[in-house]
Amino acid sequence: MKRFFFALLRSTRVISVIAWLNRKRVPILCYHSVTDGAEAVQPDPHKQHIPLHLFLQHLDYLKKKHNVVSLPEFQKARRERRALPDYSVVLTFDDGFEDFYKVVAPHLGRRKLPATVFVITDRAGDSFVSNGESFLSWAEIRELASSGIDIGSHTCSHPYLPDLSVLDITKELSESQAAIRSQLGQAQVSLSYPYGQVSESISRLAKSIGYSCAIASDAGPNDQSANLYELSRTVIASDDDIATFSARVSGLTWWISRGRRLFRSETDVSWEPSFSRRYGSTAAQSYFDS
């Protein structure tokens, strides 16, 4: 149903109109894992393991329709109060899965597309494997950085930050940043909050620790007034075909989710809390509503 709906909107150019209306806003696309196997990863309850053939369709769409800029360039433009070209978009990858090195990076390199990888620093440099998921080593991270990939922090251990004490939040943010700077000699480090969850006090802390920017929950493309320490991401699902992907990039899925939330009672979203621990409440609605 979702695919049919967005295919119809794409064929009637509704998505193109929405993209034009949002052309000055910048979506920060959030991927997780890209797999090159013939079979989809199962189980995949959070829709984070996208098959390579779909991911390449996404990249080709972006090359044709959008201006892909790096996260550092996005920040620089914001701080200089300089507008980016219309239809600009930023590519990011959360968690630092090893398949970024093996599967994603070669295709980005061929297309000359910039990207940021947010790594969970405690999972780098050892053999941490959870549910068959392997993560980038520091050697791979250093190689990616030397090739031009931007490396950011996804904290030390990927906790749900609002549940922690100020001391523990400070440790998660500062030690992860220090590890990246030590391993890479990288002065500027950006942050992606685990599960996209943040509070005003946490965003202030991230700024005081010295992060260059921080990305929070799924709230559509970013306009010029967006807080650099509460930037919005657009989470991409593993089953997003081109029509659905174009709807996400245009900002349409966020508009739909926001509109539906205005008319939905709390009892209608009883499924949301457990999912929001993984991606944030707005992202949860983006997955299931669109």
Image (cartoon, helix red, strand yellow):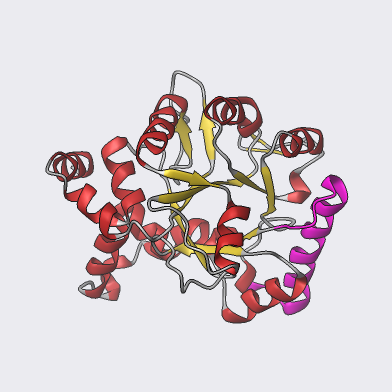
Q: Which residue lies furthest to the right in this view?
A: 182
Left/right of residue 41 with respect to residue 54 in the rendered view? right
The image position of residue 136, as x and y in percent, is: 71, 37
Q: Residue furthest top?
A: 38
What residue appears at the point 64 percent right and 68 percent down from the top-left corner?
A: 161
Q: Is residue 70 positioned above or below 283 on the image? A: above
Q: In the depicted view, which residue is nearer to us: 39 or 232?
A: 232
What residue appears at the point 82 percent right and 61 percent down from the top-left corner?
A: 175
* 164 drawn magenta: yes
Question: Is residue 42 at least partly visible in the picture?
Answer: no
The image position of residue 8, as x and y in percent, is: 13, 41
The image position of residue 200, as x and y in percent, is: 58, 80
Principal SS element in the magenta part? helix
Left/right of residue 134 with respect to residue 179 in the rendered view? left
Q: In the depicted view, which residue is nearer to us: 125 or 118?
A: 118
Q: Count all numbered tags in the image, as a single digit.
A: 0
The image quarter containing residue 165 is bottom right
What residue appears at the point 81 percent right and 34 percent down from the top-left corner?
A: 139
Left/right of residue 284 with respect to residue 9 in the rendered view? right
Question: Is residue 135 at least partly visible in the picture?
Answer: yes
* 81 drawn magenta: no
Q: In the depicted view, which residue is nearer to us: 25 or 140?
A: 25
Specify the segment rendered in magenta: 163-189
What residue appears at the point 57 percent right and 77 percent down from the top-left corner?
A: 199
Left/right of residue 214 with respect to residue 236 in the rendered view? right
The image quarter containing residue 258 is bottom left
Q: Which residue lies furthest to the bottom in this view?
A: 201
Q: Is residue 270 positioned above or below 202 on the image? A: above
Q: Is residue 113 positioned above or below 283 on the image? A: above
